[in-house]
Amino acid sequence: MRLRYCAAFLFASALGAATLDLHRATVVVRPGDLPPAEKTAATVLVEELERRTGIRLPVTSTWPADGLAIAITGGPATAWGRTAPAPPSHPEGFRLRAEDRAIWIAGSDARGSLYGVGHLLRQVRWAKGALELDAPLDVSTSPVYPIRGHQLGYRSTANSWDAWTVAQFEQYIRELALFGVNSIENIPFQDDLQNPLMKVPRREMNRAMSEICARYGLDYWVWTPADFDLKDAARRAQRLAGFDAFFKDVPSLAAIFVPGGDPGSNPPEILWPYLGEIAQHMRPFHQRAKVWLSLQGF
């Protein structure tokens, strides 16, 4: 077994299969200011491998002079003087290819590079002090559905993650992303009770979840039912003020999702203008965010 760690990185068997020894590999990223998801992809790869093996791979933007490179790119890889394998043309896809001296994780975009890291983590064989990958390997894939989300409402009725820390939320969101999730939906207002299990105030967690999504390049949604009589001017103004504070707090926001009912029983002629007010309050802080309406019974 020791021979494997000395000279070469690719060993062919009698059947033509091969094993790449990754324990001295170098993670290579593109130089310059990278999109958040592509930058996080390298961090995730290094941290998740170290957690399982005790091996911490170095990260550089310069191609190593010798040894095995794990190259992560969410765009053209010409900076290294090498041509990455072509990824799928579909958004959020990736190409994962293992060669003699390189493992390529070539994303169609920044998110694709993160999903490629997730696939690589599921392919490697690991133990304490050991890290291997079977070769040859060449996978090219892209998601079928453009929206792949998960609701994680930090509120008193969650019965699970209301007791989580920010770090636990990040790890859970990370693992969802590694399996292809691109959207996280929070519930920032409903059930305003702060229960004793909550490690941080709800407003703080709302902001933290948005920050996590921003680092991972994921869409941050919130689900906000109109669960009161919108003809009540005082309550309507109070909720819009809550939106203002929320919009200022969170660094990223993709969409506000309002159910037509369940809960809420406001008729369309009252609900529609309210949605317009939400959009007006949101626009100064999140110009590209949208307001969505489900067709549950009004």
Image: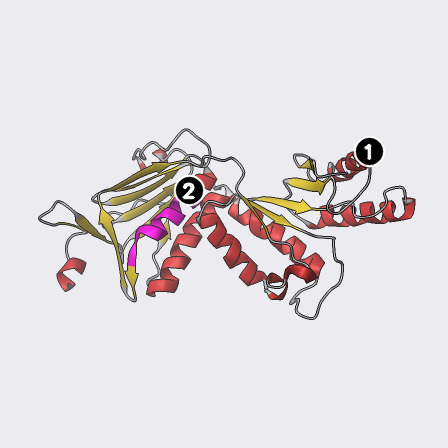
Write the residue at 20% across / 44% down: 100
* In this picture, residue 277 sits left or right of residue 63: right
Residue projecting furthest to the front = 297
Mark 2 or mark 1, whichever is nearer to me: 1
Residue found 52% across the figure and 53% down from its top: 173
Q: Residue sitting at 26 percent across and 54 percent down?
A: 22
The image shows residue 92, relative to residue 245, as above or below, that is: above
> Looking at the figure, which quarter contains the C terminus?
top right
In the rendered image, residue 119 lying in the magenta stretch gets the answer yes
Please tell me which residue lies in front, 190 or 165: 190
Q: List the residue tagged with mark 2.
A: 113
| Disc 2, SS | helix
Which residue of the protein is positioned furthest toward the left in this rendering?
14
Residue 260: percent from left, percent from top: 74, 39
Horizontal relation, residue 119 to residue 202: left or right: left
Give the amino acid at mark 1.
Pro
Locate residue 45, reporting x and y percent: 39, 53
Quadrant of residue 161 in the image? bottom right
Residue farthest to the bottom, as pictured:
196
Cα distance between the residues tagged 2 and 1: 41 Å
Q: Magenta residues, as a range?
A: 114-125
Amino acid under label 2? Answer: Ser
Q: Residues within 10 Å of mark 2 (few under 14, many from 20)?
A: many
The majority secondary structure of the magenta stretch comes to helix
Figure coloring = secondary structure
Give whichever of discs 2 and 1 has the lower sequence position: 2
- Residue 62: image location, x then y, percent: 34, 45
Would residue 45 be found to the left or right of residue 170 on screen? left
Residue behind mark 1: 273
Question: In which quadrant of the rendered view does residue 288 lie?
Answer: top right
